[in-house]
Image (cartoon, rainbow, N blue to C red):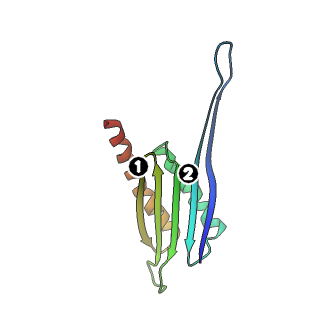
């Protein structure tokens, strides 16, 4: 019982008007966000929440290629039974975070906070090389 949702979330377009002797520069950046829910069907509201939050990761690192969010309800149903797993694909690497919380919104926030730290460290490592 797995539901996957693919969303093209972030699109940036930068265009510079052509002048004589200058070529047109056009830059398009698209980050794919994939949401997968296991043992339940994620509401549109939850998906919108995840897309909005995940899109903000680009502020921490510009070259994110894909964000994969996996939501899982752990059995039996108890408190702290919602696991959120986050994979972020960057050039040459995949960063991973997993958190368990009472709600998926809380889990997503915890994962994204931890991922921002990982992305900042990854970016600093790239600068040193």
Q: Position of residue 8 (x, y in %)?
A: 63, 52
Secondary structure at numbered mark 2? helix
Q: Residue most toward the top?
A: 20
Q: Position of residue 61 (x, y in %)?
A: 46, 44
Q: Position of residue 110 (x, y in %)?
A: 43, 63
Q: Residues within 10 Å of mark 1 (few under 14, many from 20)?
A: many
Q: Who's the residue at 52% across and 60% down the image?
A: 68
Q: Who's the residue at 49% across and 63% down the image?
A: 108
Mark earlier in primary sequence (1, 2):
2
Dot 2 corresponds to which residue? 55
Q: Who's the residue at 64% across and 17% down the image?
A: 22
Identify whether 58 is placed above or below 40.
above
Q: Residues within 10 Å of mark 2 (few under 14, many from 20)?
A: some
Dot 1 corresponds to which residue? 119
Name the one closer to the observer, 66 or 98.
66
Q: What is the CA distance from the residue labelled 1 to the residue labelled 2?
A: 14 Å
Q: How many marks?
A: 2
Secondary structure at numbered mark 1? helix
């Amino acid at each position: 019982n797995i539901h996957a949702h693919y969303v093209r979330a972030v699109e940036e377009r930068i265009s510079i008007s052509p002048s004589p002797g200058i070529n047109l520069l056009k830059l398009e950046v698209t980050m794919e966000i994939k949401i997968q829910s296991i043992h339940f069907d994620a509401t549109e509201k939850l998906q919108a929440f995840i897309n909005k939050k995940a899109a903000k990761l680009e502020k921490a690192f510009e070259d994110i290629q894909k964000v994969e969010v996996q939501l899982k309800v752990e059995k039996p149903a108890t408190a702290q039974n919602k696991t959120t797993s986050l994979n972020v694909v960057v050039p040459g690497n995949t960063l991973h975070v997993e958190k368990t919380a009472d709600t998926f919104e809380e889990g997503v926030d915890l994962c994204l906070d931890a991922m921002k730290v990982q992305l900042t460290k990854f970016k600093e490592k790239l600068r040193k090389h």
